[in-house]
Amino acid sequence: MLPADVDQTAALLGAGQYVSNRQLATAVFLALSLNRPLLLEGEAGVGKTELAKVLAETLDRQLIRLQCYEGLDLASAAYEWNYPRQMVAIRLAEAQGRIAGVNETLYTEENLIERPLLAALRPHLSGPPVLLIDEIDRADEPFEAFLLELLSDFQLSIPEFGVVRAASPPIVVITSNRTREIHDALRRRCLYHWIDYPTLEAESRIVALKASGAAAELRRQMVEFVQVLRREDLFKPPGVAETIDWAHALARLDAAELTPGLVDDTLGSLLKYQDDIARIRGAEAAKILSGIEAAA
């Protein structure tokens, strides 16, 4: 069953080891209770995609994921026709001399191949699925226009077949890293929430949940180090995903605490651009680490 209020929503996310604040829990509750798509924006690696995964897991629903990219079209996103099967039907009709009525057998349910958007409108035994439309900002703008019907009426118009409507609307989560602006028409159909980098306390809880194998003192040092890094002038500041990756890497090295040399050796787990690594490695990393220990 869906959560009955914001507190139950926060508890639901917590059960999936997702650390949220009151504002995010409220946005999720409203999206679930009002059957509205939820548009999540924020920097890469802050937990937008993870939220949809957690909802699917904790609500025991199927997760249907559409990964967006430049050039995404209907055949990949929504549906396509089984052309080889249609060609066989045409050849068979020609051989049997009944080609006049073959069109009636070409565009049928049996010849329709479901892609994520169409699959999300179909009935599911566990209940309406969670439809994750991931990184919508990577798709072309015309694709947004196609989504308007789906997000407004939870239906899909197929010219040769008819309109497919969802008996029960799917739970729709749309994510964007804001590499380009999303059109206002799509935004109006969604509830909106910006997921920012977490606070020190929230990130400490996340790392404790997701990388419990790292020593407590090490977790404290690395989270404080990452928080300082995000205030530096970097091309790509580390997200929460990178913090967790770094924690796993340090735990695998049996590290008990951060040292300048250990930071230099493992920065590739945390920063993904050489210019950023070169800027931090060496004296700057030692300076940040010294400041953390002085404030402890």
Image (tube, rainbow, N blue to C red):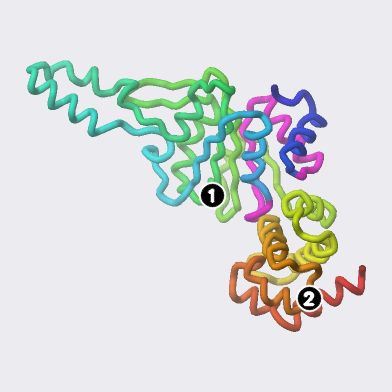
Which image quadrant: the N terminus? top right
In which image quadrant can residue 95 be found? top left
> Circles 1 and 2: CB distance less than 8 Å?
no
Q: Earlier in the sequence, mark 1 or mark 2?
A: 1
Amino acid type at mark 1: Asp
Task: Give coordinates of residue 65: x percent, y percent.
Answer: 52, 39
Task: Give coordinates of residue 112: x percent, y percent.
Answer: 34, 27
Q: Label 1's element?
A: helix
Residue at the location (60% across, 45% down)? 175
Task: Give coordinates of residue 230: x percent, y percent.
Answer: 74, 65
Residue at the location (65% across, 46% down)? 48
Task: Give coordinates of residue 286: x percent, y percent.
Answer: 78, 79
In which image quadrant can residue 85 be found? top left
Amino acid type at mark 2: Thr
The residue under label 1 is 137
Q: Is residue 83 above or below residue 284?
A: above
Q: Is residue 1 magenta?
A: no
Which image quadrant: the C terminus? bottom right
How many marks on residues? Answer: 2
Q: Label 2's element?
A: loop
Q: CA distance from mark 1 to mark 2?
A: 39 Å
Closest to the observer: 73 or 247?
Answer: 247
Residue 259's tag is: 2
Does 10 sit left or right of 240 as displayed?
right
Q: Is residue 261 above or below residue 240?
A: below
Q: Is residue 23 magenta?
A: yes
Magenta stretch bounds: 19-46
Indicate which label's residue lies in the foreground, 1 or 2. Answer: 2
Binning the other alpha carbons within 10 Å of mark 1 as few (below 14), some (14 to 19) or many (20 upward) gives many
Residue at the location (49% across, 46% down)? 68
